[in-house]
Image (spheres, rainbow, N blue to C red):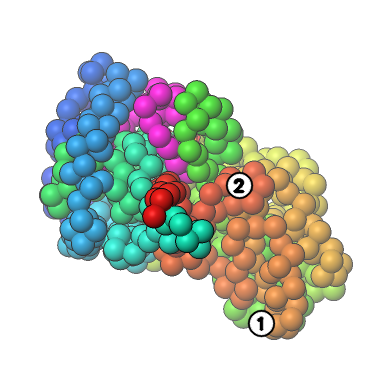
Amino acid sequence: MAAATVSVERAASGARNSAALDFLRKPKQLLIGGKWVAAKSGKTFETINPSNEEVLALIAEGDKADVDLAVKAARKAFDEGQWSKIGPHERARYLFKIAELIDKHADELAQLETLDNGKPLTFSSAFDIPAAAETFRYYGGWVTKIYGETNPSDPSFFNYTLREPVGVCGQIIPWNFPLLMAAWKLGPALACGNTVILKPAEQTPLTALRLGELIMEAGVPEGVLNIITGFGPGAGSSIAEHPDIDKVAFTGSTEVGKIILKASAGNLKKVSLELGGKAPNIIFPDADLDQAVPTAMMGVFFNSGQVCCAGTRIFVQREKYGEVVDKLAKFSKNVTMGDPFDQKSTIGPLVSKEQFDRVKGYLEVGKKEGATVSAGGEAGAGKGYFVNPTLFSDVKNEMRIAREEIFGPVGTAISFTDENDAVFQGNNTEYGLSAAVWTRDISRAHKVARSLKAGTVWVNCYNQLDPISPFGGYKQSGFGRELGRYAIDLYTQIKSVWMKL
Ligand code: NAI
Ligand code: MG
């Protein structure tokens, strides 16, 4: 339909990697049973470059009919055992090979990520792509270390446990870290011997599709990985509801997480959910401000604030509030927003028009609620979904801008009276994904880390993420822990075997 409007030259004008440009020119199809195919309906949708609003490519729009085919392929591959039942050393080698191929094509993947998502190339090159490779490598290491147990049974019996793959897994991922989220999901699922139907976000399907090609190139048997691009209602909901999918893993909004959980009841799928956040970022008066100010603020602005663990509620003790807010505002005003292909840019545009309108809406909400704009506060002018790095001060924890996930470069500075008040206000939220504490007092650091109801607490740092360490939420930030050895629990089930001796 809209094929005539796609101009790779125009849409990808900043990109310099010829492989990325070649990839953009090819058809973007679904991966089902090892073959790239058009959607049954023949429909496609556009993926947009958010820094210039041009159409980058047309993408196959998968829906229920395509999900059904993908589930059949994944079930067949699982049952035939060419993945689930091969030796662990052999399966490990595939994961290492995938990591190697990501490294080999790192620049191409980084440029595609920057085109599709808008994040600065310096970040996609230094963080997203290497972290995705590292995640596959880390789970490649786990394949040979998935142990069962022998249990202290009565001597007339022998009882042991086996850890077996769950089966066919549906994985629905968001657009903020497109390749990395695919790696967080696929790494452990494949390591444990499962087969997968992956649904990338409709805003950013490109790197997942390229990863699909690389995974086929690594020699992973057909049907082990299937990729269905498409929308939430349609491709996503068909995965969540499918009677022959054994597990669904989701990262995205709390609202959709609840829909997925309800849909899972049909066949009692195992579910893991990694949802929104509104992290407290608590700066005590004894903190090293030279460290705390830039790191806490980048905890808000990183990836244009489109991060589930963004530290958007910055708590500052009342006596130092004015001084610290001045420093936070000064830092915010110096953050460079611009063309994501420009090395000087620290933040790029938001991912989509929808996200842009949403964040702009919150800028108005904050002003109406009586917060003071200490930095930014406006959307950028001209083409692209740019919003200026913004700091609201004089914010009360009850305001909507302090309660609702904005998912844009917008921080809120809130005052507290003492340690108890900081913890109370920090925990006074529906969410519980992450939190941070800034102090030089080690006993306070430990006490507050224990008191905060969050899946991750950072002390004197922010956004430390590594596949070695579990990640996931308390409260309405979801359940289940990804990464670390905990993801092995998400993608295996335990069988207890009793033998009479
Ligand atoms: P979303 O939750 O709608 O989208 C995430 C993924 O879920 C996408 O792949 C989407 O296609 C899929 N999806 C949507 N509706 C579905 C349904 N009914 N059944 C199955 N899958 C479905 O998030 P959206 O609309 O892109 O962003 C809205 C807000 O969600 C953001 O402003 C942010 O607050 C939050 N969000 C949180 C993320 C996180 O990392 N925890 C990531 C993305 C968004
Ligand atoms: Mg949505």
Residue 426 is one of the magenta-drawn residues: no
Q: What element carries label 2?
A: helix
**From where the camera sits, is residue 242 visible?**
yes
**From where the camera sits, is residue 385 visible?**
no
Question: What is the spatial separation of the Cα atoms under label 1 and label 2, in whole angstroms?
Answer: 30 Å
Residue 385: image location, x then y, percent: 46, 43
Q: What element carries label 1?
A: loop
Q: Which residue is drawn at 45% across and 41% down?
A: 249
Identity, as a three-letter code, of the amino acid under mark 1: Asp
What stretch of residues is rendered in magenta?
A: 225-251
Q: Which residue is drawn at 40% across and 24% down?
A: 243
Judge: label 1 CB < 8 Å from ligand 1. no
Label 2: how many Cα within 10 Å (few below 14, some 14–19, many 20+): many
- Left or right side of 2 for 240: right
Per the image, the residue denoted by label 1 is 288
Mark 1 or mark 2: name the one nearer the start of the chain.
Answer: 1
Residue 429: image location, x then y, percent: 73, 49
**Residue 477: mark:** 2
Q: In which quarter of the image is the N terminus?
A: top left
